Image (tube, helix red, strand yellow):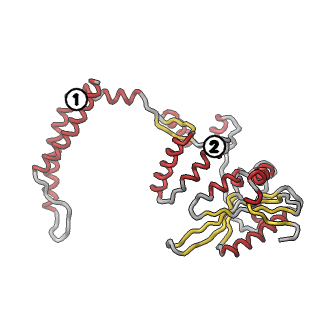
Amino acid sequence: MSAATEIKSRLDVGRERWDAFVNETDEGWLWHRWDLIEALAFWPGYEDASFALVDRQGTLLALMPLHRVVTRVARVMPIVRLVSLGGPASARSSKRELILSELHDHLLQLIADHNAVAAETQIAALTPLLRGPGAPKDNPLVGAGFENKQTETWMVDLTRRPDEIRRRYSELTRRELRKASQSEIRLREAAGSKDLEIYYRLHLETYARTGATPHPLAYFQAIFEKFQPVGLARILFAERRRTRDATRRAQSIGPARQSLTRRAAKTGCCLTRRLFRRATKASRTTKPDKLSSIRPIPKSAALAASNNLLARICGLIIAARFIRGA
């Protein structure tokens, strides 16, 4: 670190100065903002290590959102990484290379101090620096001493007319959009604590299905309370509409109850004979030297299964009659 610059922690800089700098530089974006850095600190194993580079007068030259992330191998051995969502954001200056060099040296020091295996960073494709005709053609992180791991992002310019945007879609995508517009699904924007509970319940169900570790509720609460009200985030729900056709279908069961009863009686008898034939055939073809879970089903059990089916169908008929009568 040169004598002309100094490293300060995010807390030493303060919220107002930090976010003001993010708004002024074209290298700053949502990922650099104070509230998102704090929201990410709710993730398990995440600890804020964000810092800024200032000159002798205390003027901000650059800042970098950073978290110390600890994961454990076999739940025992800790592995430390330094992760930056957003990467370095510096002010427009003729000394940009020198500023990036200072940041690089500080990151190397942090890696040594925390015994970290690596420092990783990502830049959002929506960062103003990467948009427009003057955007750099190479990875700007290479100049800060990072290895190039560049990927590609598909972006859609939403300022164009909807029909112009859809013309560029594939035929399969347009077909799916037409099907969605004719379905019973509607979109609505989330708002309030009740929708936060709904969202988090869906989050837990999704992560349980995929086997991933869910994020804590406090992380989403920060998004609902600090990002959505000021227009920095939009949260949409896809919900199924309730239609009158569904009510009509439920009521139409009643008039058909007599023919349904006759069909149910015939189905029950056929089911009894089918179950008995299948069970006795399986018992004859099963070899004695192999363990098998197939055993003969007595006629009484098959009749019980048939009667159980008839009871369920009759219960449906009674329910339909009750609905119609109500």
The mark nearer the N terminus, 2 or 1, is 2
Residue at image position (58%, 64%) is 45
- The one nearer the camera, 196 or 245, is 196
Query: Does 7 appear above or below 77?
Result: above
Q: Secondary structure at mark 1?
A: helix
Q: Position of residue 26 (x, y in %)?
A: 79, 51
Find residue 199 and name its label: none
Residue 102 seen in the figure:
yes
Against 40, residue 263 (above or below) is above
Q: Residue at x 50, y 45 (%)?
A: 197
Numbered disc total: 2
Q: CA distance from mark 2 to mark 1?
A: 52 Å
Q: Which residue is mark 2?
A: 228
Residue located at (62% from left, 57% from top): 40
Residue 130 visible, this orientation:
no
Badge 2 crowding class, 10 Å Cα cut-off, few under 14, some 14 to 19, many 20 or more, is some
Residue toward you, 257 or 206: 206
Q: Position of residue 144 (x, y in %)?
A: 77, 66
Tell me where residue 11 appears, x and y as whole percent. 73, 59
Q: Quadrant of residue 271?
A: top left
The type of residue carrying mark 2 is: Gln
Q: Residues within 10 Å of mark 1 (few under 14, many from 20)?
A: some
Mark 2: secondary structure: loop
- Quarter of the image with the C terminus is top left
Work out which quarter of the rendered image holds the N terminus and state it. bottom right
Say which of 98 and 76 sits in front.
76
| 199 relative position to 95: left or right | left
The label nearer to you, 2 versus 1, is 2
User: The disc labelled 1 sits on which kind of residue?
Assistant: Arg
Residue 257 - label = 1
